[in-house]
Image (cartoon, rainbow, N blue to C red):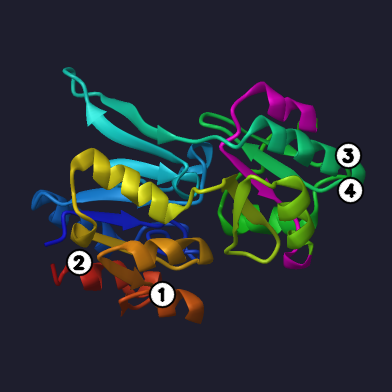
Amino acid sequence: MTKIIFFDIDGTLVSFNTHKIPQSTIDAVHKVRQHGVKVWIATGRPMPFINNLEGLEYDGVMCVNGAHCIVRSSDTNGEKEDKIIYSKPVSRDAVIRMIAEQEKTGKAVVYAGKERAILTAPHGIPEELKEVFTLLDLNIPTLYSPQEALTFDVMQVIAFFTQQESCHIMNDVLTDCNETRWHPSFADCVAKGTDKAAGMDKVIEYYGFDLSETMAFGDGGNDITMLRHAGIGVAMGNANDDVKAAADVVTSTVDDDGVARILQML
């Protein structure tokens, strides 16, 4: 029996075409929650970039690919309070090395914390960064000097480097980080040992659920570990073949009611 479901955001809950959650998804999620199933967001986005869940009911957020897990709970006045159950920032040494790399190469990097995200781009904002933020329907963060990243806990390094540059960056710069990609222009880098599967384990430990009681939906490369790990992994129809291969079930696309089609079977 499924007791908790983890949902990726972009391309899973939210359409890249409309930048909205289909009403069928909102209704289906509402129905499963009425039956006592916990609903968690499982996203590569940092908290400052989660701005597109209007109308959706959910119990918690596992953001920055599992490095930061927050339970939404109600206080006595009925207002929502967040309870952090797990948080593993990127090491300060890794951030220092990334800043040094930027000073040499001018690479654009977004440093994302728990409450703020800053853009650093010593040689100017590249076109590929603008394209990604347009794709996600996000405003480009305020531009700062890279040194500003040392003033807060960095939960995620969103670094604009190519797959060909990955060997150097991950082996020489972000040596204690994991790299995941869902777009060729950049990588989401979080503390090593952290991914969506590891984040799932922290959440189900909190509730006392078994892994067999979990379900997960995703469409991107950063969802693969989660889909393999879950009791039932569901790949969206718009996912790449490697993501579909990691899942137990492949549904239709986000724009063709892919989430609702599966939840209606529960």
Q: Considering only vertical position in the picture, is 82 above or below 57?
A: above
| Cα distance in 3D space between marks 3 and 2 | 49 Å
Report the magenta residues as a range.
146-164
Callout 4 amino acid: Thr
Residue located beneath label 1 in the image: 246
Separation of marks 3 and 4 at Cα, in angstroms: 6 Å
Residue 103, label in figure: 3
SS class, disc 1: helix
Tell me, yes or no, whether the two marked residues, 3 and 4, touch with CB atoms within 8 Å: yes
Please state the horizontal and vertical placement of residue 229, each as a whole percent of the image.
34, 63
Residue 106 numbered mark, or none: none
* N-terminal label among 4 and 2: 4
Q: Which residue is mark 4?
A: 105
x and y percentages locating residue 66 in the rendered image = 44, 47
Query: Residue 128: within the magenta?
Result: no
The alpha-carbon separation of the residues under discs 4 and 2 comes to: 47 Å
Badge 1, how many Cα within 10 Å: few under 14, some, many 20+?
many
Q: Which residue is mark 2?
A: 263
SS type, badge 2 = helix
Of the residues shown, which amino acid type is indicated by label 2?
Leu
Q: CA distance from mark 3 to mark 1?
A: 39 Å
